[in-house]
Image (cartoon, helix red, strand yellow):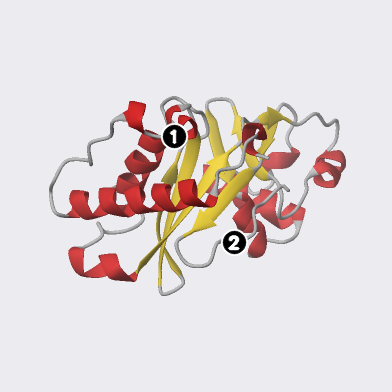
Amino acid sequence: MVENYKLRESERKELLRLARLSIEKAVAGQSHPELNLETLPLSFQQFGATFITLTKQGRLRGCIGTLEAYQPLVQDVCEHAVAAAMSDYRFSQVSSNEIPELRIEISRLTTPQILQFETPEELLSKLRPNIDGVIIKDGQRRSTFLPQVWESLSQPEDFLTHLCQKMGAGSTCWKKKGIQVFIYQVEKFTEVGYLQDEGD
């Protein structure tokens, strides 16, 4: 699945544990947990790109990540867990009394691939709801939705319209000549009852 390797359940649980520990330390004003890469699984040492999504009572409480792998997977998870809790501009910083109510979801991304299309209609036909994460790029601006967003925006046209709005562009920017679209898939897992992976 993700770069031809799926994480074992034990690896998923450990990443989730480290993500929560990182948030707890950050909220308490402490530094990140120390990581000795040499003692960790090889999958943790390899570069990986992740998004960390925090929810509280079923509502979004923070979501931050990266589209390109630039550091070991375990460090990426810890860094973005803290960022989702402390640096998502849409929300106030997570407080210590909220931590027990948080649910952490990790999305591990494949390398984005450019999608070739000639017309807006062809673009719509090539998107795979509930499988593809989508990146729209217009010059220096870009924006993405994880595959999970299909749950609330199930129609490709609505999905792209909201993605353009998220980027700060007109709602029909996806129809514009020269727009670039990339797709990726994710391996996602949560603390409470692992969800079925996307892109199997």
Quick check: can you spot residue 58? yes
Q: Which of 190 and 174 is in front in this view?
A: 190
110 vs 10, left or right, is: right
52 vs 112, left or right, is: left
Q: Position of residue 18 (x, y in %)?
A: 33, 48
Does residue 42 lie above or below 107 as drawn? Answer: above
- Name the secondary structure under disc 1: loop
Q: Looking at the image, which residue sits at the far bottom?
A: 57
Q: Position of residue 31 (x, y in %)?
A: 16, 41
Q: Mark 2 points at which residue?
A: 195
Crowd rating for badge 1 (residues with CA inside 10 Å; few <14, some 14–19, many 20+)? few
Q: Which of 4 and 176 is in front in this view?
A: 4
Q: Residue at x 19, y 54 (%)?
A: 27
Mark number, residue 41: 1
Q: Position of residue 73 (x, y in %)?
A: 44, 34
Mark number, residue 65: none
Observer-side mark, 1 or 2, equals: 1
Q: Do the residues labelled 1 and 2 touch (CB within 8 Å)?
A: no
Q: Where is residue 105 in the image (x, y as percent from the top left)?
A: 47, 56
Q: Nearer the viewer, residue 193 or 91?
A: 193
Quadrant of the rendered image containing residue 35:
top left
Which of the two discs, 1 and 2, labels the residue nearer the N terminus? 1
